[in-house]
Amino acid sequence: MLFFVIIALAIWGFDRFYYTPQRQKISKLKEEIKGANSKLSESLLLTQGIEALETEVSRLEKELGGINQRTLRGEEFKAFLRHLAKDCDRLQIKVVSLTPQEEKIPLQEGKKAPSAFHDRKIAVQIVLHSTYVSLGNYLRGIEGLSFPVTLDHLQVERDEEILPFLKVTMGLTVHVIS
């Protein structure tokens, strides 16, 4: 009987002092592995997102380089006028009046040296006689220009004297980078 008590005490001591602490260490290590795996999967997702962003940035840089080659800096307003003349002829739009006016940009205090790129804005007020379809085609053509043109306001009126055309008054802003 004493032999069985010594064996039982040895098994109890082994379980109490060695096996149970090792089992707790193993469970803690398994939890740490799960945490590390979740962090690894998050970092893989971030890496994929960064790679996608780098690809998009390089595509946009190439597109910007193409835009700069198509239109010389400072020549945006001339290109806008050429586009207007070409589309008015093609779409049978009659230009009644065109009033360009360069917007004055106030000088910022504390800024002594001009920056490398100077952005000027030219506000253009245009009055046209056009059909609705031609006006839509012209506005879609403005979207395709290689430089930013902002449509500030658009007013379409029906005038009995110029039927079947509509009287269109619009304000545009042409951004010129020099």
Image (spheres, rainbow, N blue to C red):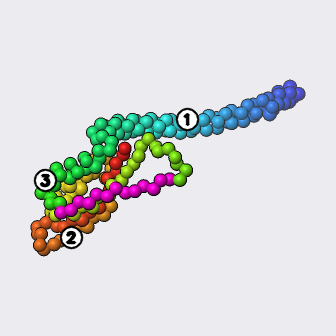
Relative side of 33 to 137, left or right: right
User: Residue sitting at 11 percent across and 72 percent down?
Assistant: 161
User: Residue sitting at 55 percent across and 35 percent down?
Assistant: 40
Q: Residue 12 carries which label?
A: none
Q: Name the residue under label 2.
A: 157
Q: Which one is earlier in the sequence, the residue at label 1 or at label 2? A: 1
Can you give x and y, in whole percent of width and height, for residue 113 in the image?
50, 44
Residue 51 lies in what quarter of the image? Answer: top left
Label 3: how many Cα within 10 Å (few below 14, some 14–19, many 20+): few
Can you give x and y, in whole percent of width and height, for residue 66 in the image?
31, 37
Label 3: element kind:
helix
The CA distance from mark 1 to mark 2 is 62 Å
Q: Which mark is residue 40?
A: 1
Q: What range is drawn magenta here?
A: 96-108
Residue type for callout 3: Asp
2 vs 3, front mark: 3
Label 1: element kind:
helix
The CA distance from mark 3 to mark 1 is 61 Å
Residue 67 lies in what quarter of the image? Answer: top left
* Vertical position of residue 139 compared to residue 36: above or below: below
Front position in the image: 54 or 86: 86
| Residue 8 in view here | no
Residue type for callout 2: Glu
Q: How many marks?
A: 3
Q: Mark 3 points at which residue?
A: 89
Label 2: how many Cα within 10 Å (few below 14, some 14–19, many 20+): few
Front position in the image: 139 or 84: 84
